[in-house]
Amino acid sequence: MKIQSIAFAGLVGILGLASFSASAAEAKLQTVAAIYKNKAALVGKTVRAEGKVVKVNNGIMDRSFVHVQDGTGAAGSNNLVVTSKQTAKVGDQVTISGVAVVNRDFGSGYSYPLLIENATIAGKK
C-alpha cells in the first residue's frame, strides 16, 4: 500500500497536480497606489488591478498603451500605464493583469517609472 501511495504521489507531482497555486493562475488584486508603492518588489511579477480607462493610444510599436486609474494614489502614482495587444475605450471599467517593469525607456522622451507590460485587459463585470 505504501508503494502505491508513493507512486501516486510521484505521478501527481509529475503531472503538476499537487498544488495548483492561485497566484500562478491569477495575481492578487491591488490598487494603483499599492502597485506604485511596492514597484521595486513587483519587478518581473504579474500584477493585477481594476480601474477606469482614462487614456488610450493604439498601434504604437504594435501594442496599445492604456492608462488606468482607480482613484488611489497622488499625482505621479495614480495612473497605471499598461501595454497590451488588446485595447479598451476611454471610460471602460477594466481589470488588467501584466508584468511590472520599472524605468522603461523607449527613447524620444518616452520613459516610464512603472509600466505593466504584455497585459490582458478584461471588461469589469
Image (cartoon, rainbow, N blue to C red):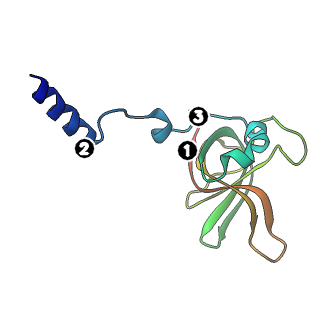
Kind of residue sitting beneath label 2: Ile
- Residue annotated with mark 1: 122
Q: Looking at the image, which is closer to me, 23 or 118?
A: 23
Task: Name which of mark 1 and mark 2 comes first in the sequence.
Answer: 2
Q: Is residue 68 visible?
A: no
Which mark is on residue 26?
none
State the residue lying farthest toward the top. Answer: 1
Q: Quadrant of the N terminus?
A: top left
**Where is residue 108, by image quadrant?**
bottom right
Q: Nearer the viewer, mark 2 or mark 3?
A: 2
Which residue lies at the image location 72% right of the left edge and 50% below the top edge?
90
Residue 22 lies left or right of residue 69; in this view the side is left
- Residue annotated with mark 2: 14
Q: Nearer the viewer, mark 1 or mark 3?
A: 3
**Mark 2 and mark 1 in contact (Cβ < 8 Å)?**
no
Which residue lies at the image location 56% right of the left edge and 32% below the top edge?
125
**Where is residue 21, by image quadrant?**
top left
SS of the residue under disc 3: loop
Where is residue 77 drawn, in percent x and y?
A: 84, 45
Residue 96 lies left or right of residue 77; in this view the side is left
Residue 8 lies left or right of residue 19; in this view the side is left
Question: CA–CA distance between discs 2 and 3?
Answer: 27 Å
SS of the residue under disc 2: helix
- Residue annotated with mark 3: 28
Question: CA–CA distance between discs 1 and 3?
Answer: 15 Å
Question: CA–CA distance between discs 1 and 2?
Answer: 33 Å
Which residue lies at the image location 50% right of the left edge and 37% below the top edge?
23
Where is residue 80 drawn, in percent x and y?
A: 74, 49
Q: Nearer the viewer, mark 1 or mark 2?
A: 2
Task: Name which of mark 2 and mark 3 comes first in the sequence.
Answer: 2
Residue 87 lies left or right of residue 79; in this view the side is left
